[in-house]
Image (spheres, rainbow, N blue to C red):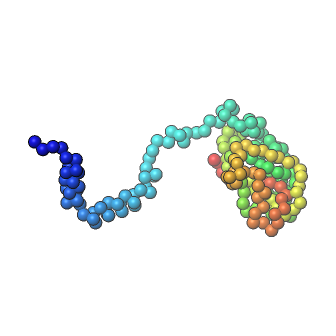
Amino acid sequence: MKKFDPDALGENMLRRFAGGTSRRGMLARLGLALVAAPVFPLLPVSRAGASKPDRSPEAKTAFARGAQTTDDTKCTYWRYCAIDGSLCTCCGGGVHTCPPGAEPSPVSWVGTCINPEDGKAYLIAYRDCCGKAYCAKCDCDNTDRETQLYMPQLNNDVIWCFGTASMEYHCSTAVLVGTA
């Protein structure tokens, strides 16, 4: 009886494999795998983690528990969960419009605020109005879900007057983008 020789066994298996395949066939399979790989994320999978977020009063932030929907000149207005600065509603503008003489910044930071009337979360784009002296009315510094400065698009401590004629800050708006 022959001894068990792992080298001979491995050599025999590789020779059979090489005898039954070609280089072109291997390249075709490799190409097929590369073309099909981007389709895998589209396959149906269990979305247990994507269930609706907890909107119970206990799960809400301190701002969301005290938010109101009637007075947009108060820092507790529901859209202002992540605003920092003077409210344009107190400076001659609106919730989503700059006052006359001020220019909206083309860039913004974002926040997700919960409307207490319907309990839904909405994406809010906060845009600074620039080009006039600081308004200094209705100053708010709401930091609901604010991130550190290493994620500037979610941080309200930056003056967002980039891309305007003047970097002089006047007030901030809260534009409703859509549901979150």
Location of residue 161 by image quarter: bottom right
Task: Look at the image and tell me whether residue 79 can be seen.
Answer: no
Q: Residue furthest front?
A: 3
Say left or right for 176 vs 34. right
User: Residue at coordinates 63% horizontally, 47% vertically from top-left?
Assistant: 180
User: Residue at coordinates 43% horizontally, 50% vertically from top-left?
Assistant: 43
Q: Residue furthest top?
A: 58
Residue 98, above or below 43: below
Say left or right for 136 vs 109. right
Residue 115 rendering spot, x and y as whole percentages? 71, 42
Q: Nearer the viewer, residue 149 or 32?
A: 149
Residue 29 rendering spot, x and y as whole percentages? 32, 60
User: Residue at coordinates 85% horizontally, 48% vertically from top-left?
Assistant: 139
Q: How many marks?
A: 0
Q: Nearer the viewer, residue 177 or 164?
A: 164
User: Residue at coordinates 37% horizontally, 58% vertically from top-left?
Assistant: 33
Say left or right for 3 vs 60. left
Location of residue 30 by image quarter: bottom left
Residue 170 rendering spot, x and y as whole percentages? 85, 58
Task: Look at the image and tell me whether residue 119 can be seen.
Answer: yes
Say left or right for 137 vs 3. right
Residue 155 rendering spot, x and y as whole percentages? 72, 51
Residue 114, above or below 151: above
State the quadrant of the N terminus: top left
Q: Residue furthest bottom?
A: 165
